Image (tube, rainbow, N blue to C red):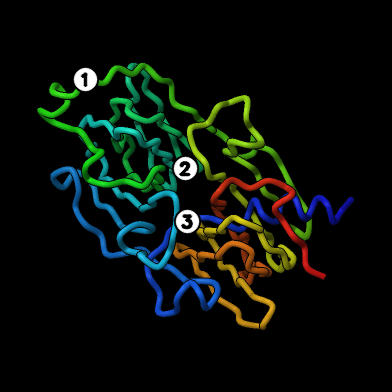
Amino acid sequence: MHRIALLLFTCMLLSAGCLTASESGVEAGVVLITPAAGIPIFDGQATYFGIIGNETPEIQANYSMGFVAIASGNATPPHRLIGTAELVYVLGGTAEIHCDNETVTAREGETVLLPEGVLQSIASAGDADLHYITVSQPAYTPEIEISGDELDAVNVKTDCAPFVVADPRKGIEWSANDTIIYTLANPVLMSDLALPINYSLAYGEIQPGGYLDYDGINGSSDLIYVIEGELSVTTLDGRALLVPAGSAAYVPPGLVKESRNTADSVTKLLSFVDPAWTPEKTALWG
């Protein structure tokens, strides 16, 4: 029973994050990724650091991902993303998110999923700057973004409520080996919610010395983003990749690996599995 529990949560943790190209290709195994150089967006109201997208042509993902920073008091102007659902995970600060006729206030650790096409705006409402991870699926391209005078020229009618996870610990819980994982969004395991995404998202905490045993995810990639602490990802051939806070690791589908907290404090992670994780996809090793 213990091993089954480990199988279930192992995969939920091991994918998350923030990516940019590394010297080693995907064929070599796990890829270490650090955020790309920031570029101003929305007339300087925000700064975007590319993670997955044009910055990582070697990674074949069904979504795009970035890190966004908005100074206190600034906001993105009203805009629509046609045909794309956007997920926001708040890393720090306070986000005031307008979604059609509803406004959501999200703080550190909270997740908001905005349905495709909604009229949206994100403001940094607190005293501190707002930092968040953004994921768009299908992948973002400039052509899908409608703003300014174009809003009046496009006939789009939406009135959709955002999907909100205010407390990660209210998600589906898995635990073992001093590790605890919470599933935040999974279109398969949470089919009753009709989530408009094909990947899954989990939040995890690994105590010092804790680990996820060797496993692989058949047919799905892992994206591991380290929020706090430090993670070592080791493959069967003994190669170890150290992932510090603010960086990420991309693990190709089916690659067997172990993940271990090498910090003296709790390591906190985000995990994206694409396509969405299910228990039968995980193969334990040994």
Q: Secondary structure at mark 3?
A: loop
Residue 2 appears left or right of 181: right
Look at label 2 and name its amino acid: Glu
Q: Is residue 260 visible?
A: no
Q: Residue at x 32, y 20 (%)?
A: 100
Residue 36 shown left or right of residue 186 in the figure: left
For label 1, the residue is: 155
Amino acid type for the residue under numbered disc 3: Gly
CA distance for labels 1 and 3: 34 Å
Q: CA distance from mark 1 to mark 2?
A: 35 Å
Residue at position x 49%, y 28% from top?
163
Q: Quadrant of the C terminus?
A: bottom right
Q: Nearer the viewer, residue 30 or 267?
A: 30
Near mark 3 (Cα within 10 A), the count class, few <14, some 14-19 or many ≥20, is: many
| Residue for badge 2 | 108
Query: On the picture, is 242 further left or further right than 87?
Result: right
- N-term-proximal mark, 1 vs 2: 2
Q: Vertical placement of 247 versus 140: above or below?
A: below
- Residue 98 in the image: x percent, y percent? 32, 26
Q: Secondary structure at mark 2?
A: loop
Crowding around mark 2 (Cα neighbors within 10 Å: few <14, some 14 to 19, many 20+) is: some
Q: Residue at x 58, y 26 (%)?
A: 193
In the image, what residue type sits under mark 1? Asn
Which residue is more in the foreground, 94 or 66? 66
Residue depicted at x 53% and y 32%: 166
Residue 224: which numbered mark, if any? Answer: none
